[in-house]
Image (cartoon, helix red, strand yellow):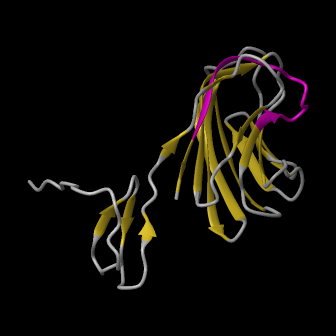
Amino acid sequence: MSILVLTSDTLIGTAAAGNLEYNGQFFGTDSNASRAQMQRIVRGTAVASTSGTSIDFTGIPAWAKRITVMFYGVSTNGSSAVRFRLGSGSVQTTGYISTSFSSSGAGPATAGFDQTSFASAGDVRYGFIAFLNISGNDWIADGGFTQGSTVIAQTTGGVALTGVLDLVRITTVNGTDTFDAGTINIMYEG
């Protein structure tokens, strides 16, 4: 077994191939001239989804290439489908190419990544959806949820954002159902 011991918190003057450095964050060097920060998985602050018609996660760093939104026991006071939207400075409401299906049916969406809903008010949802940066400001999505005790829902699709992604919004298709139970959180990684 090997142990890595860090004895300094400063970067070396000239990057050297194969070095691993530490300066509050890890950096790897792959040539004599470049130094790249090694990003870690960052978990956001969990939000109680017990009120409001939307929940936003903002301040996502520009280096993030994968964002995962996680649900634990989330429900609303109505039966409208849950909708996920991405944004760059503001929420993007058009341009989504998305399809969702569940054990009860399917449907396309262009205003967000929708979770096909055949739920009743108070049905709880568990699961996650991941957004992955494929190139530039183009993102793809894939996720799955349990909904109530009898429905499994899958959501997939893509969207070209107008700028660098820095926010994720969770709402409902009708925009008026209120979250009334559960916890939502995100993770992002480079």
Vertical position of residue 138 compared to residue 106: above or below: below
- Outermost residue, left side: 1
Residue 51 at x, y percent in the picture: 77, 17
The residue lying toward the viewer, choosing from 20 and 154, is 20
* Range drawn in magenta: 170-186
Res. 115 visible in picture = no
Q: Residue at x 36, y 84 (%)?
A: 31
Residue 142: percent from left, percent from top: 63, 51
Give 8 or 20, whichever is nearer the viewer. 8
- Residue 185 rendering spot, x and y as whole percentages: 60, 33
Q: Nearer the viewer, residue 178 or 62?
A: 62
* Residue 118 coordinates in the image, percent (x, y): 77, 28
In this view, the residue farthest toward the bottom is 32
Characterize the magenta stretch by its predominant secondary structure. strand
The quadrant in which residue 162 appears is: bottom right
Side of 110 relative to 152 (left or right): right
Q: Name which residue lies at 79% across and 55% down.
A: 88
Question: In the displayed structure, does residue 1 sit left or right of residue 161?
Answer: left
Residue at screen point 43% across, 80% down? 34
Vertical relation: 32 (above or below) 42:
below
Is 67 colored magenta in this rendering? no
Residue 175 falls within the magenta-colored stretch: yes
How many marks are shown on the rendered structure?
A: 0
> Is 125 left, or right, of 189 in this rendering?
right
Drawn side of residue 166 relative to residue 173, left or right: left
| Residue 119 figure quarter | top right
Q: Residue at x 68, y 46 (%)?
A: 59
